[in-house]
Amino acid sequence: CEPMKKYIEERGGQVLVNQPLASIETNEDGSVKCFKMRDGKEIVADEYVSSVPCDIMKRILPRAWSTDPFFRQIDELEGIPVINIHLWFDRKLLNVNHLCFSRSPLLSVYADMSTCCKEYEDPDKSMLELVFAPCSPIAGGGVNWMGKSDEEIVQATMKELERLFPTEIGAHLPDGGAKLLKHAVVKVPRSVYAAVPGRNKFRPSQETPIKNFTLGGKLAAEVVACRAAGEATKGLKEIDASILAKKDSFEPKDPMGVKGKTPIAFGGGEVLGKGFESKLRDQEAVLLEA
């Protein structure tokens, strides 16, 4: 994230860390008044953007917006777990300078960051970053990898990499193949929404009915309408009829808020290590179930 932070600060912006959001405060017309932090600080701006996953958005949604069909459609979405794996090798593997889709049933996409990313650039050693998914029955997988140790996950990953890189990784090679120097396993209990049939229609657009509030991240769907002259314009996505049919029954709801200060609490990921079971039990106990 350091390059992003640098980009913002070079243009006069400020990046605040360890500043958990308490609530989104609204004006009488429903527009955002400020983002209120847990320490009482109020962040006032011309435009506000939220890129949190669907499960977190449900928890921080202001009462003033809770009966709006645009936001209530998010109730139909549920985040799924994802595991990101970082592997450092003792040599350079054959690679290409872009993200690759994998034929592995465990590793959906991967990239050699030593080639693709300047911050990890290394002409002699590869650093692979992989998405281990689906990683639980909730996400459509056959094994609950969220309940497995880092060592078990890395072992399964290396076995799959032997298939993807048969001439470079594996004990069957004359020199034993590329050696793993170190690893990091990042577990994200509530990541992107579950892309099951019939769910995509409930994704809200990036533009919202709130004049100074925009949605970002994987939750929001970009809507581009093409005019006759070929000009592209963004706009609100049409709300599904099933949601509109229930709009008169929507009752105002106070936001539940987010508990904890960890990345997981706000929809991010963590390297949980050996204490992963107790940490997940405190935050997402359901993911430990077989």
Image (cartoon, rainbow, N blue to C red):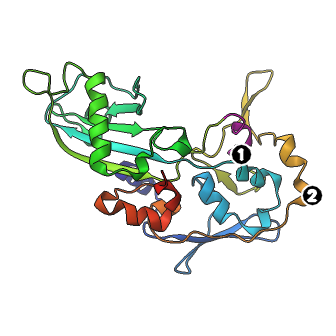
Q: Amino acid at mark 2?
A: Asp
Q: Residue at x 49, y 55 (%)?
A: 289
Q: Residue at x 46, y 68 (%)?
A: 282
Disc 1 versus disc 2: distance between alpha carbons?
Answer: 19 Å
Indicate yes or no whether the magenta region holds residue 38. no
Q: Amino acid at mark 1?
A: Pro
Q: Residue 49's x, y, as percent? A: 61, 55
Quadrant in which residue 165 is drawn = top left
What are the residue bounds of the magenta stretch? 197-206
Quadrant in which residue 64 is drawn = bottom right
Whether 196 is drawn above or below 258: the answer is above
Mark 1 Cα-neighbour bin, 10 Å: few <14, some 14–19, many ≥20: many
User: Are the residues flagged by discs 1 and 2 in contact, CB closer than 8 Å?
Assistant: no
Q: Nearer the viewer, residue 249 or 266?
A: 249
Q: Does residue 17 appear to the left or right of 38 in the view shown?
A: left
Q: Residue 153's x, y, as percent? A: 32, 44
Q: Residue 252's x, y, as percent? A: 82, 68
Mark 2 Cα-neighbour bin, 10 Å: few <14, some 14–19, many ≥20: few
Q: Residue at x 78, y 62 (%)?
A: 66
Q: Is residue 269 visible?
A: yes
The residue where tag 1 is placed is 204
Q: Nearer the viewer, residue 156 or 8?
A: 156
Which sits earlier in the primary sequence, circle 1 or circle 2? 1
The residue where tag 2 is placed is 248
Question: Magenta segment, principal secondary structure?
Answer: loop
Whether 123 is drawn above or below 10: the answer is above
Q: Residue at x 70, y 43 (%)?
A: 203
Quadrant in which residue 159 is drawn = top left
Indicate yes or no whether the magenta region holds residue 205. yes
Q: Is residue 113 visible?
A: no
Q: Secondary structure at mark 1?
A: loop
